[in-house]
């Protein structure tokens, strides 16, 4: 999807046991699908699809230490 | 297969004849000299390329320009006089010898160093500079670092190691001296910077509005502090390019210092300029806007005035617009379209960057810029040829956007060729080994490259860098195979990526799959990765 069609955001999905896992897309479903392109089933199972925070690119540095 | 490792433009070699006996003997002799006496070989090569380039410059620019360039061999009077040693010294970071070898490609100057030194000098803080790139050993650097008060380093991620060594030597020679650092690595990875004990001051963010106070009174700053940038690029002074390191040897000719040699995107000497700062898009391997604040673009007139000034002083051959994203903000581009051909001393050909979706959004403006302003080298980060891989990279472009842009540039290039003009071509960034990329995605990338009639490729395996969204996430997952190493071109980087597959792909094992559905002309087109990171 072109940048002229949809605005994209960064999504931080909660990880079981603590921390966040980052992905991006026009909405959380889109970001979840992109995450699935890259992670193994086991890794995806550790990530909680319905618990996420949506952030802007400019805020990214605030969350780096939370990533797992 | 049609993947070529040599650095030549994308072209069809299918009509080449087999070598004659004399050509075979000549190649054997060259190979023998290169193997048995590499030093002699490098001298012969440099001299041959030197003469070849003089011939090219004579035909492109005429005798006046070539004679002018020879002035670089003669030191001016000021250079011969003994100089008073400044308490402030910059170390220009990079690879040893980059500004000594005539065949070196990595010859671009550092705009950050140039800008900050210019600001210091305007305020009367005269500094010296020693460059790693004009020497081949730390001994030479060591001599220059003695008896100084302040060492200043602009640290990029891929220069962390030489920065650390320069700081270590400086502190050994000047125990009371202060090491002042800043630059992109300080901004994207402040923790790594703080772990280097020799770095006394670390400026996070832009330094142009802080450098004078910092150098004048370093004790008034904490160890780590936020930088202060200008609100607009219009507030920046023009860089005094004579403050850049001067190359040595035959390279002086090629560099046309204080202008630059470029990468043969256009005739030398090359004037590199910035018209804008920060790409606002969100590609997950970059995310520049998460660590650099947006700032006002330079006025069109100011850019043209500076180019004319450089031309008056040194004679510009072509221009490189080093913006992360030139083709944005249509109103600015329309003003550039109107004024550059009229006001510039000459409509110099230039290299500048676009995105395939912006080209598709504003195709008429793009075509007019290519034709009327001599935008002859269009840099596009295509990166990947499949929607799936493009989504992993958060490129926010589609396969269709890429195809549209390639077909448009092919068509304009064909027209220009018919009109007897030098056709527009791509400088095309390509990424392989993207985490989560499947073989069929990589096949699509090679197919996309074959669609380009005229392109030079800059290809690399994906690498996880701090600062980028995907880079941070991959590092957090423990999948970065070379943590803390930020050198480009280090080959295999990411756990889980099947690099053997890519070796096979580049060696032609999957030609049949790649060529599926392509017409004969596209299929036979050579894919030329040059000497890029995928082979290192």
Image: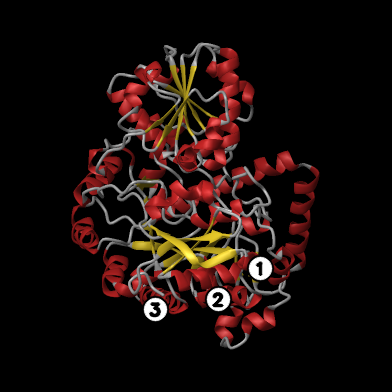
Residue at 61 percent of width and 70 percent of height: B437
Q: Quadrant of the C terminus of chain B?
A: bottom right
Residue A10, how many percent across, how many down? 43, 61
Instruction: Pick whichever, B43 or B309, lies toward us.
Output: B309
Please, is residue B2 above or below residue B238 in the view?
below
- Pointer 2 with pointer 1, Cβ within 8 A: no
Judged from the image, the secondary structure of the residue bearing numbered disc 2 is helix
* Label 2 sits on residue: B450
Same chain check for tags 2 and 3: yes
Closer to viewer: mark 1 or mark 3: 1
Q: Mark 2 against mark 3, which lies toward the viewer?
A: 2
Tell me residue B86's x, y (percent).
42, 15
- Calculate the distance from the C-alpha at mark 1 to the C-alpha at mark 3: 43 Å
Q: Position of residue B504 (x, y in %)?
A: 73, 70
Q: CA distance from mark 2 to mark 3?
A: 15 Å
Residue B130 higher or lower than B2, as above or below? above
Question: Can see residue B432?
Answer: no
> Residue A40 got which mark?
1
Q: Is residue B322 left or right of residue B515?
A: left
Of residues B28 and B166, the one drawn nearer to the viewer in this rendering: B166
| Whole-percent x, y for residue B20 in the image | 74, 69
Horizontal placement of B140 versus B201: left or right? right
């Amino acid at each position: 999807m072109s940048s002229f069609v949809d605005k994209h955001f960064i999504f931080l999905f909660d990880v079981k046991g603590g921390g966040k896992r980052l992905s991006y897309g026009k909405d959380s479903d889109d970001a979840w699908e992109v995450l699935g392109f890259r992670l193994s089933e086991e890794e995806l199972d550790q990530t909680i699809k319905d618990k996420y925070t949506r952030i802007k690119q400019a805020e990214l540095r605030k969350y780096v230490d939370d990533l797992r | 297969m049609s993947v070529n490792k040599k650095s030549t433009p994308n072209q069809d070699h299918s009509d080449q004849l087999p070598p004659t006996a004399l050509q075979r003997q000549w190649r054997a002799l060259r190979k023998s000299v290169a193997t048995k006496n590499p030093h002699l070989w490098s001298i012969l090569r440099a001299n041959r390329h030197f003469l070849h380039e003089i011939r090219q410059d004579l035909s492109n620019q005429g005798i006046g320009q070539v004679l002018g360039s020879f002035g670089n061999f003669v030191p001016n009077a000021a250079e011969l006089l003994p100089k008073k040693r400044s308490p402030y010294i910059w170390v220009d970071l990079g690879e040893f010898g980059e500004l000594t070898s005539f065949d070196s490609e990595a010859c671009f100057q550092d705009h950050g160093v140039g800008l900050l030194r210019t600001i210091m000098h305007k305020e009367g803080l005269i500094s010296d500079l020693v460059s790693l790139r004009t020497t081949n050993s730390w001994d030479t650097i060591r001599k220059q670092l003695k008896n100084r008060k302040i060492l200043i380093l602009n640290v990029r991620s891929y220069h962390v190691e030489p920065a650390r060594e320069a700081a270590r030597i400086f502190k050994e020679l000047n125990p009371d001296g202060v090491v002042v650092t800043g630059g992109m690595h300080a901004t994207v990875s402040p923790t790594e910077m703080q772990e280097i004990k020799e770095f006394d001051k670390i400026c996070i963010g832009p330094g142009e509005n802080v450098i004078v106070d910092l150098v004048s009174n370093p004790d008034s700053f904490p160890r780590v502090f936020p930088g202060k940038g200008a609100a607009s690029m219009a507030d920046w002074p023009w860089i005094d390019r004579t403050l850049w390191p001067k190359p040595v040897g035959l390279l002086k000719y090629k560099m046309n210092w204080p202008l630059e040699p470029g990468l043969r995107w256009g005739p030398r000497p090359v004037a590199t300029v910035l018209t804008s700062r920060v790409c606002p898009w969100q590609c997950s391997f970059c995310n520049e806007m998460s660590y650099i604040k947006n700032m006002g673009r330079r006025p069109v007139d100011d850019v043209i005035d500076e180019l004319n000034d450089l031309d008056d002083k040194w004679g510009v051959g072509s221009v490189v617009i080093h913006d992360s994203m030139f083709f944005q903000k249509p109103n600015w581009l329309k003003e550039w379209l109107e004024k550059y051909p009229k006001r510039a001393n000459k409509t110099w050909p230039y290299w500048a960057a676009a995105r395939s979706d912006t080209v598709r959004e504003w195709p008429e403006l793009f075509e007019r810029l290519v034709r009327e302003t001599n935008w002859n080298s269009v840099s596009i980060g295509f990166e990947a040829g499949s929607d799936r891989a493009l989504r992993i990279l958060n490129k926010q472009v589609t396969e269709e956007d890429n195809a549209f842009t390639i077909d448009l540039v092919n068509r304009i290039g064909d027209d220009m060729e018919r009109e007897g003009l030098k056709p527009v071509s791509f400088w095309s960034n390509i990424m392989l080994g993207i985490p989560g990329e499947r073989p069929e995605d990589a096949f699509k990338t090679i197919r996309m490259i074959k669609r380009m009639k005229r392109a030079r490729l800059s290809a690399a395996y994906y690498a996880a860098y701090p600062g980028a969204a995907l880079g941070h996430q991959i590092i957090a997952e423990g999948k970065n195979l070379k943590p803390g190493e930020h050198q480009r071109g280090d080959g295999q980087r990411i756990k889980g990526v099947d690099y053997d597959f890519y070796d096979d792909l580049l060696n032609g094992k999957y030609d049949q799959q790649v060529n599926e559905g392509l017409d004969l002309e596209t299929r036979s087109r050579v894919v030329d990765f040059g000497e890029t990171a995928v082979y290192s």
